[in-house]
Image (cartoon, rainbow, N blue to C red):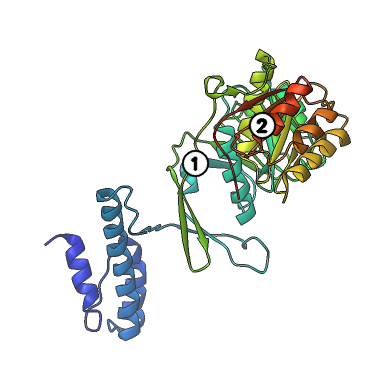
Amino acid sequence: MGGISLIRAAAKNWLDVLVVSSMEMYDDLLTLLVEKDGETDLDDRRYFAAGAFDVSSHYDTAIFNWMNPGDIKRFKRSEQKANVLRYGENPHQEGIFYGHPEEIYEQLHGRAISYNNLLDLDAAVHLIDDFEETTFAVIKHNNACGLACRENLTEAWKDALAGDPVSAFGGVLVTNRTVDVATATEINKIFFEIILAPDYKPEALEVLKAKKNRIILKKKDYTFAGEQFRSILNGTLWQQRDVVTETDTSLEVKTKVLPTAAEVEDLLFANKIVKHTKSNAIVLAKNKQLLGSGTGQTSRVDALRHAIEKANAFNLSLEGAVMASDAFFPFADSVEIADKAGIKAVIQPGGSIRDKDSIAYCDLHQMSMVFTGIRHFKH
C-alpha cells in the first residue's frame, strides 16, 4: 500500500484513529499529547482527519487534472497555500488569496499586498507581457491610465505619466526593463502604491525605498495557464485566456486610404492596450503614447467621448492620432466624432451589419480603417 492509501484509510477511521498526515502537524500533535497526557478525544481526531483528507484530496485532484487535461465535464481545483489579506475589496470584507505569488514576483520592500493590489498586479502583468519595446505603464483599477514605448526608460516613464498625471496618483507602475537611478528619481516625485519591474539597479532601489510602505516587486519569468475562472451566481465560469496579439499581417484594410507605416505601428500599439481595457473600451494613441482612454462605458460613443475629454484635459493633441476599439462600431457616429477630434486611423474587429456605414464615412473623409476580426471584450 502507498502512503496516500494509508493516510486515507486512517482518516476514514477517525472515530478511533488519530492520523498525522504531514510534518507541519507534528507540533500540534506534541502539544496535544503533552496537554492531555497522551489522550485524544473525538474533536482532536476529527481535526487531524480533516488535515489528512486535505492531503489526499489535493493529491487526487492533481492526478485527475494531470490525466485529464482540458476535461470540461468536471471542475476540480485545489490550492494548498492560503494568503490571508488585510481585507477584501473593501475593509468590511474578508479576503484571501489562494496561490503562490512568489512564483511571479519577489517583494523587495514595502507593506503587505492587498486584495485590490493583487487585482491591479494581475492587470499589469498581462498588459506588460504584450510589449517587447521599452515600455512603462500606469495601472489604476485594472486599466492603463498611462503607457508609452520609448528607446529610453526615463522618457517612457515621463510620457506614460503625461497621459494622465491625475489618475497616476496611487497607481501601480509596471515596466519591462531594469529601473535605473535616473528613472527612479523621476518616479519618486509622485505617490504610487506599487512598482513592478524585472530588476532594479542598486542605486535605483535605494531611491525607491525612501517610502517605507511603498511596495517594490521584482518580476520573475512566469508562464501563465491558458485558462481563467470566475465565481458567479451559484457556479463558476471557465474560459480560455485572451492571448491573441494582432500583427501587421493580420490586419485587413477596409478603406481607400491606406494607413502609413507609422500609423500601423500606432494602431497595433493602441490595440494591445484596448485588449486589456474594461469594456466598452476606446483607446487613443499617437507616437506610441496613450493619449486617452474610455473604459467600462455602457456605450461605445460614451467611451470615445471620455477618451477625447481625457486627452484634451492634459493638452494632448489628437491631430493625426489613431483610435482602437475593443468591439465593432454599431453605427458611423463614433468614426464621425473621432474624425472631428483629429483622428485619422482606426482599428476595430469589424462584424457589424453596418460596417459599410463606418467605412463609407472614412472614405469620404480620407480616414483609414483596418479590421482585425478579433473582438477583445473584457468584463
Could you tell me residue 236's position as x and y percent? 46, 61
Evaluate whether residue 147 shows in this view.
Answer: no
Could you tell me which secondary element the residue under label 2 belongs to?
A: helix
Foreground pick, 240 / 150 = 240
Total numbered badges shown on the rendered structure: 2
Residue 356 — which label? 2
Label 1 crowd bin: few (<14), some (14–19), many (20+), radius 10 Å = some
Residue 104 — which label? 1
Q: Is residue 351 above or below residue 344?
A: below
Label 2 crowd bin: few (<14), some (14–19), many (20+), radius 10 Å = some
Q: Image quadrant of residue 287? A: top right
Foreground pick, 333 / 148 = 333
Residue occupying image coordinates x 55% and y 38% = 126
Residue occupying image coordinates x 53% and y 41% = 106
Q: Image quadrant of residue 262? A: top right
Could you tell me residue 283's position as x and y percent? 71, 35
Q: Is residue 293 above or below residue 247?
A: below
Could you tell me which secondary element the residue under label 1 belongs to?
A: loop
Q: Which quadrant holds the N terminus?
A: bottom left
What's the amino acid at mark 1?
A: Ile
Could you tell me residue 100's position as x and y percent? 46, 49
What's the amino acid at mark 2?
A: Lys
